[in-house]
Image (cartoon, helix red, strand yellow):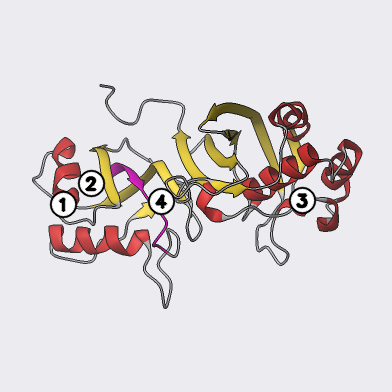
Amino acid sequence: MRYALLISYDGTDYGGWQIQPNCVSVQSKLEAAAADLFGKRTPVVASGRTDSGVHARAQVCHFDADTSIPPEKLADAFNARLPEDISVLCSAAAPDGFDCNRSAKRKTYCYRMYVSPRRSPLKDRYFAWVKNGADAEKMKYIAKVFEGEHDFKAYTKSGSTAKTTIRTVYSVTVKSSESLGATDVEIYVTGNGFLYNMVRTIAGTMLCFSQGSIDEDRIIRSLKYGERQLVGKTMPACGLTLESVDYGFPLFPVG
């Protein structure tokens, strides 16, 4: 039978979601817990691979197992075997034909940064520090340029193995607030899929626009011609969090 997990993790100390040589991954911790729980190797598949240092508020996974444990109790069984920086928030029986990756309709990421002349140690795990000034209102203005179907070739690492670099971004929303002399900026990006480094590079380009080092015409041309030199820097991984995955129906019980 197939089961679904809703998990949250702090990605700071992991080399990303996917199992790979010479580093500890989130997937390796989930599969070790599953092997201990079910007594055999149990692959755990995620809705998408988060990169090294990237966090997840609500990642969705699936696995197949024969177990007498009630679906809603699997979360507790996993959590008893997981480190403190990974937690299963909810577990459920998956519907027929469900695949957490292929069945996903849209995903939302948030990139967080704080603008301050001085560093704030308590924010540094989940926000990128921007020492030089940035204008959140200008970020809100330029956000709309990224919405719609575009070729995001310029916003991914060169040599990408993706079959196509065309993606649809449904919305880009910027929220800002003041706290302790700093401006916290959150950039929420919802799309049908994302390329490697895509959200981090969109965030860096929006930041550069707000600082005046890139103009609107240059960003429009980057989406038209796919030239990497037209866009801004790729922001640090610590500021990126996978916020949600939408399947078009409620996968987990509400409440």
Q: Residues within 10 Å of mark 1 (few under 14, many from 20)?
A: few
Rendered location of residue 19, percent (x, y):
40, 67
Which quadrant would residue 193 be assigned to in this image? top right
Instruction: Estimate the spatial distance between the alpha carbons at disc 4 and disc 2, rounded to whole Å.
Output: 17 Å
Which residue in the protein does label 4 denote?
46
Q: Residue furthest bottom?
A: 22
Magenta range is 1-14
Which quadrant would residue 162 be assigned to in this image? bottom right
Quick check: 204 left or right of 81? Answer: right
Rendered location of residue 42, percent (x, y):
25, 61
Which residue in the protein does label 1 denote?
66
Which residue in the protein does label 2 denote?
1
Between disc 4 and disc 2, the foreground one is: 4
Query: The residue tagged with tag 4: helix, strand or loop?
Result: strand
Instruction: Estimate the spatial distance between the alpha carbons at disc 2 and disc 1, rounded to whole Å.
Output: 6 Å
| Tag 4: amino acid | Ala
Residue lying at 36% horizontally and 59% vertically, measured from the top left: 26
The reply to whether residue 103 is visible in this rendering is no
Between disc 2 and disc 3, the foreground one is: 3
Query: The residue tagged with tag 2: helix, strand or loop?
Result: loop
Mark closest to the chain's N terminus, 1 or 4? 4
Mark closest to the chain's N terminus, 4 or 2? 2
Which residue in the protein does label 3 denote?
232
Quick check: 222 left or right of 99? Answer: right
| Tag 3: amino acid | Gly
Between disc 1 and disc 4, the foreground one is: 4
State yes or no: residue 9 in magenta.
yes
The reply to whether residue 252 is visible in this rendering is yes
Query: The residue tagged with tag 3: helix, strand or loop?
Result: loop
Rendered location of residue 71, percent (x, y):
17, 39
Q: Is residue 177 above or below residue 60?
A: above
- Residue closest to the eye, 230 or 74: 230
